[in-house]
Structures are given as C-alpha cells and as structure tokens.
Image (cartoon, grey):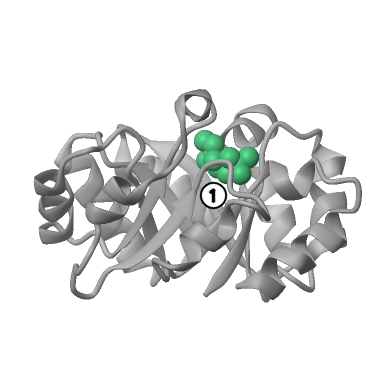
Amino acid sequence: MKLQVALDRLPRKECFAVVEAVEESVDFIEIGTGVIKEFGVGIIKEMKQKYPDKIVVADMKICDAGKHETALALDAGADIATVMAFAPMQTVQDCIQTAKKADKRIMVDLLGIRSREKVEELVANGADLLSLHIGKDEQSNGGLDAGHFKLVEGLDNVETAVAGGINQVSLPAFLTYRPNVIIVGSAITKAEDRGKAAQLIKGMM
Ligand SMILES: O=C(CO)[C@H](O)[C@H](O)COP(=O)(O)O
C-alpha cells in the first residue's frame, strides 16, 4: 500500500517544505489542482527533478482536451495524471492512450460518481487506476462510506486509491478495504509536525 501526500492550497515554497519533511514516509507526491493552476506545470518539473525516485502525480482533473492536458503534465515529468470520471469517455480514452504511449499512467477520479455501471464502463475503456474521492466541498456532508467501496469491489486488474479528509483517526476504516494508494492532504500539510504525521500514517498502513 502506497502513501500519496497531496499538496493543496499551499504557497510554492511550502510545497517543497512539506515534501522535505515527509520524504521518508511517502511514495507518491501529488501536485494539487490549485497548485498547478497557480504556479503552472513548471512546479511538476521542479518536483520531479528534486525527487526523481518518487512517483509524481499531477492532479490535473482533466475533463476535456485529454491528449493535450495529459501531455502537458507528463512532459513536465509527472508519472501519473488525473482525469475526471465524469468527463466524456473520449476524453478518458485519449488520456489513457496518451499516458500509455509515454509508459505512464492515468488515475481516474471518481468524484461525484455513484454508479457501479459507470465504473464498469470506465474499466472496459481502459481505466486501471481508480480514485474514490470525496472532495473538499463535499466533506462537510460526510466522508467515504461502504457504498463508495462497493463501486470498485471485486474489479479485476484495477488498482484503487482513496482520498478525501483522511486522517489518523479515520484511516483504520479505509485500511479494511485494502486500497492500493492512500491519499492524504490536510492531515499532513496542516499538522504541526508534518514529518511525524506522515510517519504515523505510514506506520499504520
Ligand atoms: O484532490 C484533492 C482535492 O480535490 C485532495 O488532494 C484530496 O482530497 C486529499 O486532500 P485532503 O486529505 O485534504 O482531503
């Protein structure tokens, strides 16, 4: 099981300060959507150059122009880019094909998706890394529950990630579903001691 630290709503310098503090505990480094919007894909490049052995995830949240936006992230050095599951299937396919050509991957973000049929359609179209995600805004109405995990239960040749307000207290409930990737943002980036918080979470996995 891999730990992905999500860098969201942080100044440029802080993104690097967080990674420096948690480097030993994390496997994947996610450059958050807002961070990419604010600083551009140059920050992806700089992060990958600084941490070539880490998997860098560009949370592009692509929903159109799949080939172009995937290439933007991957050419900058990302190993994985994200596409929204609600995007047109053509966009999802274009992202997956573009990543495959570069020997890289696409994470399909299931934000807002509640239909198992839709998930199966995504898998039939080549999705092999799915992220169960409760977004920042949705988190005030509750977190991930058993119903969300049913969306991906028993799918063959599919890896799963989980994201959305995960912290040291809520983590054990997610671990029972054995996802491949645990994505943690605020519980690490807002912690007083980021290194310790990441170490604790990694130790629980
Ligand atoms: O993709 C995201 C927001 O769209 C975040 O990266 C993800 O939700 C993890 O952050 P947090 O643990 O703070 O919820």
Which quadrant contains ligand 1? top right
Which residue is rendered at x = 23% and y = 63% of the image? 153
The answer to whether 87 appears left or right of 144 in the picture is left
Q: Quadrant of residue 37?
A: top right
User: At label 1, which amino acid type do we have?
Assistant: Ala
Residue 33: x %, y % from top left = 56, 36
Residue 130 seen in the current view: yes
Residue 84: x %, y % from top left = 33, 39
Residue 39, placed above or below residue 23: above
Which residue is rendered at x = 49% and y = 66% of the image? 175
Residue 105: x %, y % from top left = 39, 64
Q: Quadrant of residue 45?
A: bottom right
The answer to whether 90 appears left or right of 46 in the picture is left
The answer to whether 23 appears left or right of 29 in the picture is right
Residue 32 seen in the current view: no
Query: Quick one: 100 or 147, which is closer to the camera?
Result: 147
Q: Residues within 10 Å of mark 1 (few under 14, many from 20)?
A: many
Query: Quick one: 73 or 55, which is closer to the camera?
Result: 55
Residue position for label 1: 58
SS at mark 1 in the image: strand
Which quarter of the rendering shows the C terminus? bottom right
